[in-house]
């Protein structure tokens, strides 16, 4: 039984005995949308009563374009329909939700899961609508050409649902891909670009001449509002001073700890891969290492200061003792001269390094380490790649610790760490022209995702600008007031000065930027609102 027959069987339209109680306007129904309109399914509470028509409309639906060249001409009408459906969902949320529920119940009835026929027409009508849009390549092509924005919204809703399903079954990678596809196909994403650039421009002006916090803090505030979750919580906690300022230092330390843990984990995996390798020349000779130790003994020979010469001699003896110990172990068990064993020797020599050592002492340690590295690479070339990755990560961690004064417990260093962190959002000579910000961004991507949001909240928490910004703002407002009242020019300049006052408040501008981010975030729900609005109008009276 087809769609028309289903309606006839339950007395909702069509030709037959049931027609005598239906108005003339319902005697001919061109499509399923007209049937819903005419029988008054899910009328809007505020809609006027249906007035039977005295004539029967025979106007056919407008023809649809089938050539791709016609697509641009349909973008604006399609966008208007998209916006109209969203507006309907916002104005009539209860009716829209009820219509969605009716379709779901009808699907259960059609599947035999729920007993009854009351809701079947809703599900059948919705199914027919989707079939008309996407049933076959020809229908799909017509939909893309004639309703490109609606097609994009349908795709976004589909990808969004797939992302939720994938995340629900633990497929995080597939969920991320689907979520990104949902964002890219969301018609409201295109509207974000001009707003984003306009926001950046406003942040540059307000951050430089108003709040004197710099633009980055305002951009982070908007980002926290857009993303929500823990990032928004971290920003608001610092903005309202409900969270201690030291939380940013804890974030920093936590991020470095995460980096260190990940680095050690990767190093362990690389060494496991190295241990699984085998070959006829598995055991490595000490010849190159012995030669490096002998050459290193000459490094301190030119020193004339007795204390420096003795310290350099002591370093060489320590290095030599470690090498000789490993040679002795290798004679007892060859495993000590495998690539893994040699890597252990290299790490033992490296532990003797100390920033307080002299240049000569560091040269001894580095030369012997380099000889061990070359010995291993000569047997296992892959070791060079393992070490390059490890050393790069270690340099970044060392740079983070040094830049932000971590690893110090003396009194006063907590303030130093916090002061350096608070300078991250600026770009001047005191922050190495953005170097601190780059390190902080690296931490955000690798273990401390809420660090910059916390720092932005701290920067924007004062009600009035600090330092020179506060002085300049006060002078500017006072001059405007004097100019307006003292010269008899009226309240114009004074009012202008007072009108600029909110733009000089870090707290007010931080709240505004956060609110704008929250508003932009609503665009994520555009495709869902579009679906609700479209379904909600399926039973609306004309």
Image (cartoon, rainbow, N blue to C red):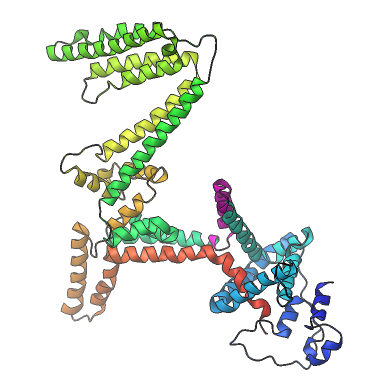
Residue 233 percent across, percent down from the top left: 36, 59
Q: Is residue 171 magenta?
A: yes
Q: Does residue 440 lie above or below 46 as drawn?
A: above
Q: Residue at coordinates 74% horizontally, 92% vertically from top-left?
A: 52
Q: Residue at coordinates 42% horizontally, 44% vertically from top-left?
A: 445
Left or right: residue 85 compared with residue 50: left
Q: Does residue 521 lie above or below 386 as drawn?
A: below
Residue 183 percent across, percent down from the top left: 55, 57
Residue 480 is drawn in which quadrant?
Answer: bottom left
Residue 289 is drawn in which quadrant?
Answer: top left
Q: Is residue 130 magenta?
A: no
Q: Quadrant of the C terminus?
A: bottom right
Foreground residue among 532 and 268: 268
How many marks can you see?
0
Residue 92 percent across, percent down from the top left: 56, 79
Left or right: residue 416 compared with residue 447: left
Foreground residue among 121 and 220: 121
Report the magenta stretch's main SS: helix
Left or right: residue 420 compared with residue 531: left
Regarding residue 58, the answer to whether it shows in the image is yes
Furthest-right residue in view?
A: 16
Q: Residue at coordinates 50% horizontally, 61% vertically from top-left?
A: 192
Residue 73 percent across, percent down from the top left: 67, 67
Q: Does residue 82 lie above or below 272 as drawn?
A: below
Residue 6 is drawn in which quadrant?
Answer: bottom right
Q: Which residues are magenta?
A: 167-189
Left or right: residue 103 compared with residue 173: right
């Amino acid at each position: 039984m087809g769609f028309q027959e289903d309606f006839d069987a339950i007395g909702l339209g069509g030709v037959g005995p049931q027609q005598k109680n239906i108005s003339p306007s319902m005697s001919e129904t061109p499509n399923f949308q007209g049937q819903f309109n005419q029988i008054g399914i899910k009328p809007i509470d505020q809609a006027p009563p249906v007035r039977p028509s005295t004539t029967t409309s025979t106007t056919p639906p407008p023809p649809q374009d089938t050539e791709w060249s016609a697509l641009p001409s349909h973008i604006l009408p399609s966008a208007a329909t998209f916006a109209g459906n969203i507006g309907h969902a916002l104005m009539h949320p209860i009716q829209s939700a009820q219509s969605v529920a009716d379709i779901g119940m009808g699907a259960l009835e059609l599947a035999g899961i729920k007993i009854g026929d009351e809701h079947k027409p809703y599900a059948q009508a919705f199914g027919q609508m989707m079939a008309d849009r996407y049933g076959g390549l020809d229908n799909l092509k017509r939909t893309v050409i004639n309703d490109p924005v609606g097609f994009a919204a349908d795709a976004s809703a589909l990808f969004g649902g797939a992302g939720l399903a994938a995340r629900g079954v633990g497929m995080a990678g597939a969920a991320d891909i689907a979520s990104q596809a949902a964002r890219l196909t969301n018609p409201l994403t295109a509207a974000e670009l001009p707003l984003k650039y306009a926001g950046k421009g406003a942040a540059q002006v307000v951050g430089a001449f108003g709040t004197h916090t710099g633009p980055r803090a305002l951009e982070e505030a908007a980002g926290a509002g857009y993303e929500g979750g823990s990032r928004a919580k971290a920003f608001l906690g610092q903005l309202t001073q409900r969270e201690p300022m030291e939380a940013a230092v804890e974030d920093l330390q936590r991020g470095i700890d995460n980096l260190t843990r990940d680095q050690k984990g990767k190093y362990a995996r690389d060494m496991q891969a190295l241990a699984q390798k085998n070959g006829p020349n598995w055991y490595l000779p000490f010849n190159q290492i012995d030669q490096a130790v002998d050459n290193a003994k000459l490094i301190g020979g030119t020193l004339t200061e007795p204390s420096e010469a003795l310290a350099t001699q002591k370093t060489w003896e320590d290095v030599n003792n470690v090498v000789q110990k490993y040679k002795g172990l290798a004679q007892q068990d060859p495993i000590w001269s495998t690539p893994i064993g040699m890597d252990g020797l290299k790490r033992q020599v490296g532990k003797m390094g100390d920033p307080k050592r002299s240049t000569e002492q560091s040269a001894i340690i580095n030369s012997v380490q380099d000889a061990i590295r070359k010995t291993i690479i000569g047997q296992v070339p892959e070791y060079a790649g393992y070490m390059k990755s490890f050393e790069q990560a270690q340099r970044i961690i060392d740079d983070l610790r040094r830049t932000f004064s971590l690893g110090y417990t003396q009194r006063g260093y907590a303030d130093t760490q916090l002061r350096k962190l608070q300078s991250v959002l600026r770009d001047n000579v005191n922050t190495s022209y953005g170097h601190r910000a780059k390190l902080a961004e690296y931490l955000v991507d690798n273990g401390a995702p809420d660090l910059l949001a916390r720092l932005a909240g701290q920067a924007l928490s004062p009600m009035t600008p600090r330092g020179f910004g506060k002085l300049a703002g006060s002078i500017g407002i006072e001059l405007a007031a004097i100019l307006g009242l003292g010269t008899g020019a009226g309240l114009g300049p004074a009012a202008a000065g007072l009108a600029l006052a909110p733009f000089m408040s870090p707290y007010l501008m931080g709240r505004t930027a956060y609110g704008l981010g929250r508003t932009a975030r609503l665009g994520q729900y555009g495709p869902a609102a579009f679906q609700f609005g479209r379904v909600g109008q399926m039973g609306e009276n004309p």
